[in-house]
Amino acid sequence: MPAFLETLEYLTFTSAWYWVFIALAWSSRAHWTISIPFDAIVRAERRGEQWEEDLDKLAQIMSRRVNYFARGGGVWGVVIVTFTLAALVTGSIVTQSQFVRGLTAVAVPMAIAAFGDIRLALRIHDTGLRGYHLRRALVWRRFLNQATGLFSLLLAASMGALTALQQSGYLLW
């Protein structure tokens, strides 16, 4: 194996940096729902008035932005993301590389969460959600993002265990 490939081969699942990365990625994903920070939702709930108006404006701005990109180049975006995810999944099965498996364990659930955020943004744009109903939709989307993040952590741990069993010789396939 060439020397440069040896430096690219990371022991992903045994690296503390991988687990720090995955925790930070999902923490950030859960905090920012369609680019709206969770603390803005909480402040709008508790303080009302100006904070609620600000949240409504921010949601409308972000949903308009997502609508522009999704409706303008959405098909190409779906094609590129689907191709990339399929390549990652195929690469993790064929090459059995820890690095590719680690990327797959993060990228696939992250794409699912991003798809949910896009759907919510389009719903806000199309229906004009405001006030209480907007806050409920954002909090529900945040919960779903957290659940997807938990699934991602379980997937990464399972893939790490599978990789360890394969490398130790306990699994023959």
Image: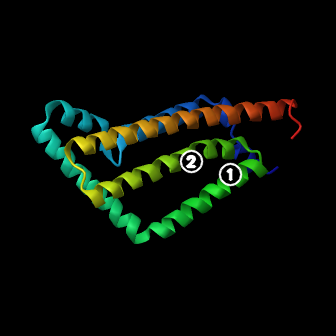
Residue 21, visible in the rendered structure: no
Please indicate, yes or no, whether residue 119 appears anywhere in the rendered image.
yes
Lateral position of residue 1 relative to residue 133, left or right? right
Above or below, 31 against 34 in this view is: above
Tell me if residue 164 comes above or below residue 82 in the rendering. above
Where's residue 10, x and y in %? Answer: 68, 40
Q: What residue type is labelled 1?
A: Val
- Quarter of the figure with the C terminus: top right
In terms of depth relative to the viewer, which is nearer, 126 or 145?
Answer: 126
The secondary structure type at the circle numbered 2 is helix
Residue 40's tag is: none
Q: Position of residue 79 (x, y in %)?
A: 55, 66
Name the residue nearer the viewer: 78 or 133: 133
Name the side, left or right, on which 62 lies relative to 21.
left
Q: Name the residue under label 1.
A: 89
Amino acid residing under circle 2: Ala
Label 2 vs 1, first from the N-terminus: 1
Residue picked out by circle 2: 107
Question: Is 149 situated left or right of 141 in this image?
Answer: right
Quadrant housing residue 109: top right
